[in-house]
Image: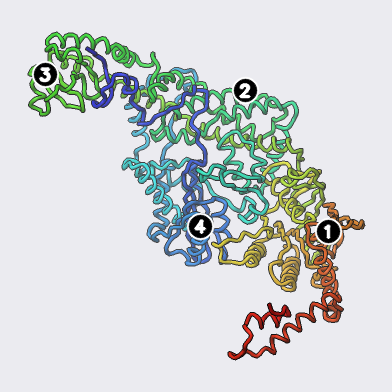
């Protein structure tokens, strides 16, 4: 005879799964981690599979858009802005947010629709043309006002710093929910409050932006309803939008996707595993700078690299923070801060899950871990020396002080029994929190003995054949049942009801289940009851109470995490700057780019020795500008041998100001930099079967983008522009672009260019009196003669930038270095020399070597014999024999 309590399905026949059957999940979730409260919580990354949705519409030359970032829960609004016919602004918007799905109104400009469809197809995303009735401004305004973020009233929070809860504070979940409902559910108050809040974003003056918001929010609702399959969540208040921000593209540097790829700011590589379709960061500037400790920090650093700042105040503040963190006396403190930052999980997403009732044990563990590490973080941040005026540090301390982590951490650890929760795969409450719950748990733990006693009483009145295998079980929601094996021959309900004293309930594959008044089932149901369900329900109520007390710090926790992410990025830049020996640049309001001893941050890691070079340009120094200082030019043209390092030099001169405006130190001996508002490049041509453009057309598109959008503070990099066409056409295009930029006068941008079109200077396409700085990459020619059968380099690259022009590309020497046949190289030199002198007729008059003359005579005789061959059907000689005669090989 066996008697025990069981929480499994009735079909379970074995008795060794009792612990598994006793599980009741919190929020129907499971957690298999065995971590302690201060160990790693759920790994919530921005790459969690959530898609980034964007919506764009436009007409009559104006565009507006919005996008939602699921990682941060922020909704970004791009106000109505004038854009050109090429939609450069929309391109930059989509490139920087990396949208997975873009919604466009069916009544938008047809060229805008075509542009978005083409762009999303090339980027691997999806463009959906939605009905125009979804893009309505007043609908967007109404939907925004219904968001919980805008409609929710601020709540009066009691001071609980001493740990004593006032008597008027609700102590159970029902009172807590009622108090929130009474406070927030006045529709008129909600509407007025939301309308006032919405005015802060200036959206009432941006109908296109509001139209896009209406379509985007409608799409998010559809997606949420599909994913969650929960009708109760199908309303705007249930959307997990934590913040609304204005996307100000005029406050950040404009860098398009081509420039980011050409400068290797990002480099996505396929994952090493063939079973994964994810990508990883390759050898790139971001990979070089990324030493962040948190997911939010990594996402923020990526945004900094996508959108460098144009504010000198912001840039210099970041430089000052890096300078402070790099001090020797702060080394230990910085190390401790990075360690404690690594203990912070992605708390905003954790809080969002808890707020919507979808939190599991891992989320509660994340809250406890957050409180633990924040307490340590406060102490270590205060140990920093000479950081009194560092804004990021002050903001972090203030944000951390606003979160009562001692109360939050103590509350969560006091309420949750981590060991039992881990074993039961649900959130369980500690003993001592609720007396009634403790009593129910005591009864539940002693239920085995009670059921054994009841089973013995029942077995006394049973036939002897049943008593040995009789079990008394407890099933949640079903109550207390007797289980016996199904006797052989019993197949119908009539057979099952042969035991008259028992009431048949149901059958499983091998067993029958009964209730009996003899086993006092009614008394058990009445006095003991469905005890497990009661325990689970009461624990949910207690956790709801605890959640309410934790959520009062919701905004403060998110603010603290954002401040911590900011410090995390600065510490990452500090570590990268210290590791590579970079220096603090001098930022100035002047439109100048002055670099001494600059190096390429990526290329320098791949070679044993890197030669530093200087650069000096001043924007706005085009034609018609009086300038007494001879060396202040806006355009630099670099010439030199093939493979001498011109492209690397151009790239490093773009990367140094880019890094400075991120807030990082720069790889140079010194740097004096003005603000660069846009960077355009013609460095790299990405071809593919999906692009209906040739390489030359792609180059032209890149230069056209630069010419349309550049300003005096822009930086343009042109590396051998025009090489994809005829040399005459390419040289003409290059000269035309340079002259057009110079004619802009004080609007002339800063330009670094390289070229091999020497006719630009020999034929006067670019006049020597133009305000252009000329440089070349120095090389050393080798005068030694190679021995017979050996190849010896005739040129040595010095990689040093020198003022002046170089009108020799040294292509022949390069060809010799890389193994091209010497005869071919010599012939190429001869032809090149003759063409450069416009003496092409010499190629016709030159004498052939005797060997070539003899060979030519033989070939001429063959042609003559073949031409004199009269073919006829009466010819006695076969065709093959005749061909041998023609070729002069005789017959067999």
Q: Quadrant of residue 826?
A: bottom right
Residue 374 x/y as whole percent: 56, 26
Of mark 2 and mark 1, the one earlier in the sequence is: 2
Q: Which residue is mark 3?
A: 502
For residue 673, side relative to residue 107 (left or right): right
> Which one is nearer the viewer's eye here, 314 or 184?
314
Whether residue 672 is visible, yes or no, is yes
How far apart in space, not on screen, are marks 1 and 3 (Cα)?
103 Å
Q: Residues within 10 Å of mark 4 (few under 14, many from 20)?
A: many
Please name whichever residue, 441 or 252, is drawn nearer the observer in this view of the structure: 441
Q: Is residue 35 left or right of residue 853?
A: left
Measured in 3D between alpha carbons, the distance from the residue under mark 4 to the one under mark 2, in whole angstroms, is 48 Å
**Label 3 – label 2 distance at C-alpha:** 69 Å
Colouring: rainbow
**Residue 725's x, y, as percent?**
69, 70
The answer to whether any part of residue 778 appears in the image is no
Which residue is disc 1 drawn over?
776
Q: Judging from the image, what secondary structure is the residue with disc 1 in?
A: strand
SS class of the residue under badge 4?
helix
Q: Is residue 798 above or below residue 353?
A: below
* Residue 568 percent across, percent down from the top left: 62, 35
Nearer the camera: disc 3 or disc 2: 3
First in residue order: circle 4 vs circle 2: 4
Q: Is residue 389 above or below residue 634?
A: above
Please state which of the two labelled residues, at mark 4 or mark 3, is closer to the viewer: 3
Asked whether, in this view, residue 828 is left or right of residue 486, the answer is: right
In the rendered view, tell whether residue 589 sits above or below residue 186.
below
- Secondary structure at badge 2 equals helix
Write down the residue under mark 4: 120
Quadrant (top left, top right, bottom left, bottom right) of the N terminus: top left
Labelled disc at residue 379: 2
Quarter that holds the C terminus? bottom right
């Amino acid at each position: 005879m066996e008697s025990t309590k069981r929480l499994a399905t009735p079909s379970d026949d074995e008795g060794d799964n009792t612990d598994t059957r006793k599980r009741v999940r919190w929020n129907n979730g499971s957690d298999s981690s065995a971590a302690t409260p201060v160990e790693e919580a759920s790994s919530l990354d921005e790459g969690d599979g959530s898609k980034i949705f964007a919506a764009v519409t436009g007409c009559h030359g104006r565009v507006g858009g919005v996008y939602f970032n699921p990682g941060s829960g922020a909704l970004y609004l791009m106000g109505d802005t004038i854009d050109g016919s090429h939609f450069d602004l929309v391109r930059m918007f989509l490139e920087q947010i990396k949208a997975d799905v873009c919604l466009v109104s069916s009544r938008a400009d047809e060229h805008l629709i075509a542009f978005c469809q083409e762009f999303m197809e090339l980027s691997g995303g999806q463009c959906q043309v939605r009905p125009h009735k979804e893009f309505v401004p007043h609908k967007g305004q109404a939907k925004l006002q219904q968001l919980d973020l805008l409609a929710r009233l601020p709540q009066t929070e009691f001071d609980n710093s001493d740990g004593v809860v006032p008597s008027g504070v609700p102590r159970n979940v029902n009172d807590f929910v009622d108090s929130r409902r009474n406070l927030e559910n006045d529709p008129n108050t909600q509407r007025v409050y939301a309308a006032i809040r919405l005015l802060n974003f200036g959206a009432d003056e941006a109908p296109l932006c509001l139209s896009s918001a209406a379509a985007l929010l409608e799409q998010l609702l559809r997606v949420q309803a599909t994913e969650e399959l929960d009708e109760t969540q199908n309303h705007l208040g249930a959307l997990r939008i934590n913040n609304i921000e204005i996307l100000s593209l005029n406050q950040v540097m404009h860098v398009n996707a081509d420039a980011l790829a050409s400068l290797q700011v990002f480099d996505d590589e396929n994952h090493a595993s063939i079973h994964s379709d994810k990508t990883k960061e390759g050898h790139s500037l971001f990979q070089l700078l990324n030493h962040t400790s948190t997911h939010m920090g990594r996402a923020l650093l990526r945004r900094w690299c996508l959108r460098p700042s144009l504010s000198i105040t912001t840039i210099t503040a970041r430089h000052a923070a890096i300078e402070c963190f790099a001090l020797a006396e702060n080394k230990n403190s910085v190390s401790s801060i990075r360690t404690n930052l690594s203990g912070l999980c992605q708390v905003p997403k954790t809080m969002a899950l808890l707020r919507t009732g979808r939190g599991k044990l891992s989320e509660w563990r994340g809250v406890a871990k957050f409180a633990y590490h924040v307490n340590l973080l406060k102490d270590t941040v205060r140990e920093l020396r000479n950081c009194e005026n560092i804004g990021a540090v002050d903001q972090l301390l203030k944000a951390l002080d606003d979160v009562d982590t001692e109360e939050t951490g103590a509350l969560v650890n006091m309420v949750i029994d981590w060991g039992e929760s881990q074993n039961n795969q649900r959130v369980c409450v500690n003993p001592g929190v609720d007396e009634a719950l403790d009593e129910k748990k005591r009864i539940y733990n002693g239920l085995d003995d009670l059921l054994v006693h009841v089973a013995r009483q029942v077995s006394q009145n049973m036939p002897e054949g049943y008593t040995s295998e009789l079990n008394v079980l407890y099933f949640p929601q079903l109550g207390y049942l007797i289980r016996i094996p199904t006797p052989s021959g019993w197949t119908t309900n009539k057979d099952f009801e042969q035991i008259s004293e028992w009431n048949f309930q149901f059958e499983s594959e091998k067993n029958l289940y009964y209730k009996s008044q003899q086993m006092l089932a009614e008394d058990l149901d009445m006095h003991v009851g469905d005890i497990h369900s009661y325990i689970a329900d009461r624990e949910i109520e207690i956790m709801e109470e605890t959640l309410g007390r934790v959520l009062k710090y919701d905004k403060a926790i998110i603010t603290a995490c954002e401040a911590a992410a900011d410090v995390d990025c600065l510490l990452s830049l500090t570590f990268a700057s210290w590791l590579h020996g970079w220096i603090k640049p001098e930022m100035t309001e002047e439109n100048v780019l002055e670099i001494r001893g600059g190096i390429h941050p990526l290329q320098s890691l791949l070679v044993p020795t890197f030669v530093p070079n200087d650069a000096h340009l001043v924007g706005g120094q085009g034609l018609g500008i009086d300038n007494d200082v001879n060396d202040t030019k806006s355009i630099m043209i670099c010439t030199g041998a093939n493979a001498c390092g011109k492209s690397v030099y151009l790239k490093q001169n773009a990367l140094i100001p880019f890094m400075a405006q991120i807030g990082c130190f720069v790889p140079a001996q010194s740097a004096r930099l003005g603000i660069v508002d846009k960077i355009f490049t013609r460095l790299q041509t990405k071809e593919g079967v999906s692009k209906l453009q040739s390489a030359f057309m792609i180059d032209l598109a890149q230069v056209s983008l630069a010419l349309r959008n550049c300003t005096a503070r822009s930086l343009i990099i042109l590396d051998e522009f025009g090489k994809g066409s005829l040399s005459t056409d390419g040289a003409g295009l290059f000269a035309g672009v340079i002259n057009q930029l110079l004619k802009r006068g004080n609007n002339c941008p800063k330009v670094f260019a390289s070229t091999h079109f020497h006719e630009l200077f020999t034929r006067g396409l670019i006049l020597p009196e133009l305000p252009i700085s000329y440089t070349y990459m120095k090389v050393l020619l080798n005068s030694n003669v190679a021995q017979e059968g050996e190849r010896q380099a005739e040129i040595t690259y010095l990689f040093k930038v020198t003022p002046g022009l170089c009108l020799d590309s040294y292509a022949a020497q390069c060809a010799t270095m890389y193994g091209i046949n010497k005869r071919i190289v010599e012939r190429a030199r001869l032809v090149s020399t003759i063409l450069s002198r416009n003496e092409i007729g010499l190629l016709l008059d030159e004498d052939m070597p005797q060997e070539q003359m003899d060979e030519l005579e033989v070939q001429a005789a063959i042609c003559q014999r073949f031409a004199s061959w009269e073919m006829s059907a009466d010819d006695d000689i076969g065709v093959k024999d005749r061909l041998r005669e023609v070729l002069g090989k005789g017959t067999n």
